[in-house]
Image (cartoon, rainbow, N blue to C red):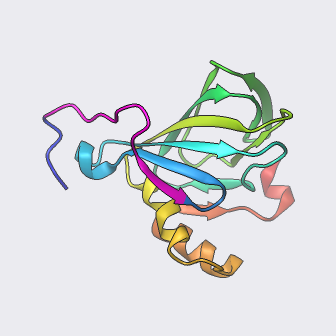
Amino acid sequence: MTAFDQAAFSHSGAGVEALAFGRHIIRITADQTGGSLGCFEAEVPAGEGPPFHIHEKEEEFFRVLEGRFAFWCNGARVDLAEGAVICVPRGAIHRFQNIGQSMGRLMVVMTPGGFEGFFPAVAREAGATPDRICQIGEQFNLRFVFDAAQAV
């Protein structure tokens, strides 16, 4: 990991594509920021979004770039449209869903960085089973919550 003593940036249209859970564009990596943060864009089809999950060591900041999204965090729901932002604390049971009628886009910043590597790791294992995806998630401090009672 390099020292974070110069600006980390990503030009318009730049980034590394990862096709896992939709299309993700990795814009800034933990390696570029001395581990401070990672940044990616997510394209989320209408009606889609991840299951409830927890990031054990990271805060997660979202900016809605396009569309409308519902966010759930520790039992509370908020609906947000283009231009809105939300920050989810580490350890929170949360998820989001595109509640619009077309493709939605999110900018996501995770701090500290490193989680942005999850999507390329899953993409490298095309056809991975749900159990394998959970194992990969554990490597990135991610835990899926499948018990509905824990998610409310």
Closer to the camera, 147 or 84? 84
Magenta stretch, main secondary structure class = loop
Q: Is residue 98 left or right of residue 53?
A: right
Q: Is residue 138 above or below residue 49?
A: below
Identified at 85% across, 45% down, the residue is: 47
> How far across and how far down the image is residue 40, in percent?
48, 43
Region of the chain picked out in magenta, as a range: 6-18
Q: Can residue 141 be seen at all in this image of the molecule?
A: no
Number of marks in picture? 0
Q: Is residue 115 above or below residue 87?
A: below
Query: Which residue is most to the top?
Result: 83
- Whole-percent x, y for residue 9 in the image: 29, 34
Q: Residue 128's image quarter? A: bottom right
Residue at the image position 39 percent from the left and 41 percent from the top: 14
The verdict on residue 68 being magenta is: no
Q: Give whichever of 150, 118 is nearer the camera.
A: 118
Determine the residue positioned at 53% across, 40% down: 60
Q: Is residue 43 above or below residue 23?
A: above
Residue 61 is situated, as x and y percent measured from the top left of the image, at 53, 34
Find out whether residue 14 is within the magenta segment.
yes
* Viewer-closest of 65 and 142: 65
Residue lying at the far front of the rendered structure: 13
Q: Can see residue 24?
A: yes
Quarter holding the N terminus?
Answer: bottom left
Q: Position of residue 79 (x, y in %)?
A: 79, 26
